[in-house]
């Protein structure tokens, strides 16, 4: 699988480490009254959807950047690759959700 890195261009997926759903970017509030339940769900209750999914990947054998990759889990077709920092910044400004 080839990942079209936004800064470096096409790279082999072997250079990257898959880290899961981008829901990992939305950490629970550790001070919330139900923080223990929220962190339990955050760590252990994961979806396993078939189809398009936004995933977090780390460019371990390259520039060590974090990427948000929109990929079809059935066909492995990649439809979008974004720097994770840009996705988080946009979410913080209220323009999109992670």
Image (cartoon, rainbow, N blue to C red):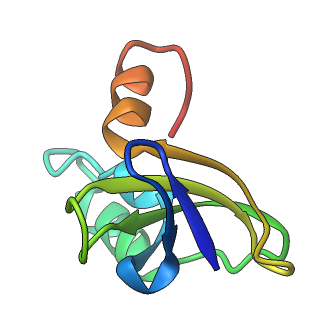
Give coordinates of residue 79: x percent, y percent.
75, 52
Give coordinates of residue 60: x percent, y percent.
24, 75
* 61 versus 93 height, above or below: below
Residue plotted at (36% across, 61% down): 38
Direction bottom: furthest residue = 14
Q: In which quarter of the image is the N terminus?
A: bottom right
Q: Quadrant of residue 15?
A: bottom left
Q: Nearer the viewer, residue 63 or 27?
A: 63
Q: Nearer the viewer, residue 74 or 14?
A: 14
* 56 versus 7 height, above or below: below
Direction front: furthest residue = 9
Residue plotted at (56% across, 24% down): 96
* 71 versus 12 height, above or below: above
Give coordinates of residue 74: x percent, y percent.
85, 81
Mark count: 0
Give coordinates of residue 87: x percent, y percent.
44, 34
Instruction: Using residue 83 as the reference point, say whether residue 1 is left or right of it.
Output: right
Instruction: Using residue 51 as the reference point, say whether residue 44 is left or right of it.
Output: left
Q: Quadrant of residue 77?
A: bottom right
Q: Nearer the viewer, residue 44 or 59?
A: 59
Direction left: furthest residue = 31
Residue plotted at (50% across, 77% down): 12
Residue plotted at (38% across, 77% down): 16
């Amino acid at each position: 699988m080839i990942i079209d890195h936004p800064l470096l261009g096409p790279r082999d997926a072997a250079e990257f480490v898959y880290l899961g759903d981008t829901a990992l970017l939305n950490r629970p509030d550790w001070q919330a009254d139900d923080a223990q339940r929220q962190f339990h769900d955050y760590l252990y209750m994961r979806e396993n959807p078939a189809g398009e999914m936004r995933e977090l990947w780390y460019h371990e054998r390259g520039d060590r950047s974090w990427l948000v990759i929109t990929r079809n889990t059935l066909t492995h077709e990649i439809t979008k690759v974004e720097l994770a920092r840009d996705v988080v910044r946009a979410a913080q400004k209220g323009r999109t959700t992670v």
